[in-house]
Image (spheres, rainbow, N blue to C red):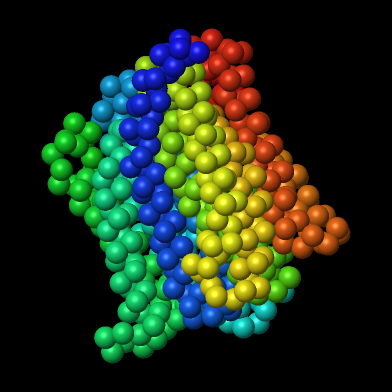
């Protein structure tokens, strides 16, 4: 045991060192949504349900842009491992502009398709509140993906603190914007949920501008020859980003899509179960976003050692990531169980919603370990640029297993929203096991020199 600790001590230390700023940044991102939910919840349960509906459906579109930006990190980490610094800047330039064009198209689609939310069999009042909010959130996709692309570039260089500082600033901007626009202060109208959307758009714009200014004027990035010019894009770099980013986008789409479709199914049960779902999911998202910091650190370290062709440390970095992630999520699961009655009270005063949310937090506690394993597994596979098989495994986990199990338990066996959440548990458990088995199978089956060839095939 002492030999294991001695061997992995430095990996744990370096992973945590990279992870905590990323975790705080991810936590800050989720806190934007949690604060929105808490402040909108004081307007009414219908507004909170509308926020849940939009956050689920709209993010289905944004997730592709997110996937395309996530692939920037391993590509930069691998180039840095090879000491090819100009290539790092080229990844940012090409990835940033492609993501802007791609996400602008998604924003246009969201703007013109949100009236079809009426076809999802949701309560009419919820849909009426959701439409203007969804349109504003769609427009905020563009500044979001600009920030995300710059953030992933910095993470690929193992520079994780600037995004953390920006996210802390963003939360202050968002709370102030919500205070002004949701409730109406300083002579402004009380816009309710629509005000929360406007605040989100302004906050994401501030985030994007802050990181771009940092990259543009900090002298530490001169070796990377960063350019934000539209001309001079490299067709091969764009093709590489598309080839790796599209499967990553689909992988996230399958996962997020399953949760979003589950929100639609829960909406069939009424506003109160949907509001309770939003509360429990917000709490689960808090723990997950902290764990994503560890996962992101795993992508960075695995990618860096992969670029250096250091097979031993690729394996150790991956295992350290998985162990840290699962341990942390187990602790959060215990917290959810112990505080399941108190946590929902921060969101609403409705006793029926609080009771439903409390039962969901017990199920959320059970799938924390699985969620930690799948977050770590997909991240370390991304560090190897292995994206196609994980995409297929995600489809099986969430759409062949998770959603059908949730539907059967929720409606056929009359477990209602609890049954749908048990479907989450089954899907996440399969995904966690499958991703980790895939990672260690790759390292065992092929020599390190052949990993890239086999993955690309």
275 shown above or below 396 = below
Position of residue 323 in the picture relative to residue 199 (left or right): right
| Residue at 31% from the left image edge and 26% from the top image edge | 80
* Residue 338 image position (x, y, % from top left): 57, 52
Q: Is residue 274 visible?
A: no
Q: Is residue 351 visible?
A: yes
State the count of labels.
0
In the picture, which quadrant includes the C terminus?
Answer: top right
User: For residue 221, what is the image quadrant?
Assistant: top left
Farthest residue toward the right?
A: 412
* Residue 319 image position (x, y, % from top left): 51, 23
Closer-to-camera residue (120/265): 265
Closer-to-camera residue (75/233): 75
| Residue at 37% from the left image edge and 32% from the top image edge | 16
User: For residue 309, what is the image quadrant?
Assistant: top left
| Residue at 23% from the left image edge and 40% from the top image edge | 226
User: For residue 5, what is the image quadrant?
Assistant: top left
| Residue at 23% from the left image edge and 33% from the top image edge | 224
Position of residue 114 in the picture relative to residue 306 (left or right): right
232 shown above or below 341 = above
Position of residue 20 in the picture relative to residue 4 (left or right): left
* Residue 423 image position (x, y, % from top left): 72, 50
Farthest residue toward the front?
A: 338
Closer-to-camera residue (452/7): 7
* Residue 268 image position (x, y, % from top left): 73, 70
Closer-to-camera residue (242/156): 156
């Amino acid at each position: 045991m002492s030999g294991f600790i001695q061997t992995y001590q430095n990996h744990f230390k370096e992973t945590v060192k990279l992870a905590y700023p990323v975790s705080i940044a991810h936590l800050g991102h989720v806190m934007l949504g949690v604060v929105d939910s808490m402040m909108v919840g004081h307007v009414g349960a219908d507004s909170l349900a509308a926020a849940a509906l939009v956050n689920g459906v709209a993010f289905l579109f944004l997730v592709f842009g997110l996937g395309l930006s996530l692939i920037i990190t391993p590509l930069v980490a691998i180039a840095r491992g090879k000491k090819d610094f100009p290539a790092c800047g080229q990844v940012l330039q090409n990835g940033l502009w492609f993501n802007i064009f791609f996400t602008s198209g998604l924003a246009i689609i969201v703007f013109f398709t949100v009236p079809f939310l009426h076809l999802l069999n949701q309560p009419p009042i919820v849909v009426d509140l959701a439409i203007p909010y969804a349109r504003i959130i769609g427009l905020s996709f563009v500044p979001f993906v600009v920030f995300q692309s710059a953030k992933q570039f910095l993470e690929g260089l193992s520079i994780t603190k600037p995004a953390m500082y920006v996210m802390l600033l963003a939360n202050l901007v968002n709370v102030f914007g919500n205070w002004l626009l949701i409730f109406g202060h300083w002579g402004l109208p009380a816009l309710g949920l629509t005000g929360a959307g406007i605040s989100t758009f302004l906050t994401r714009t501030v985030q994007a501008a802050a990181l771009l200014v940092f990259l543009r004027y900090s002298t530490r990035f001169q070796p990377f020859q960063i350019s934000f010019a539209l001309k001079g894009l490299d067709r091969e770099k764009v093709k590489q980003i598309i080839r790796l980013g599209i499967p990553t986008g689909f992988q996230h789409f399958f996962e997020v899509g399953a949760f979003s479709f589950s929100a639609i199914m829960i909406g069939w049960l009424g506003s109160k179960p949907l509001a309770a779902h939003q509360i429990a999911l917000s709490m689960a998202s808090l723990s997950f976003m902290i764990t994503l910091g560890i996962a992101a650190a795993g992508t960075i370290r695995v990618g860096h050692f992969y670029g250096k062709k250091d097979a031993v440390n690729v394996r150790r970095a991956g295992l350290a990531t998985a162990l840290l992630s699962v341990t942390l999520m187990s602790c959060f699961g215990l917290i959810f169980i112990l505080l399941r009655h108190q946590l929902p009270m921060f969101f609403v005063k409705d006793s029926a919603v609080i009771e439903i949310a409390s039962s969901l937090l017990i199920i959320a506690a059970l799938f924390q370990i699985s969620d930690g394993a799948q977050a770590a597994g997909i991240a370390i596979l991304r560090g190897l640029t292995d994206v196609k098989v994980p995409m297929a495994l995600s489809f099986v986990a969430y759409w062949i297993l998770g959603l059908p199990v949730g539907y059967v338990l929720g409606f056929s066996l009359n477990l209602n929203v609890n049954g749908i959440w048990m479907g989450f548990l089954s899907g996440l458990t399969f995904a966690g096991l499958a991703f980790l088995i895939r990672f260690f199978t790759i390292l065992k089956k092929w020599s390190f020199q052949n990993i890239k060839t086999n993955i690309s095939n």
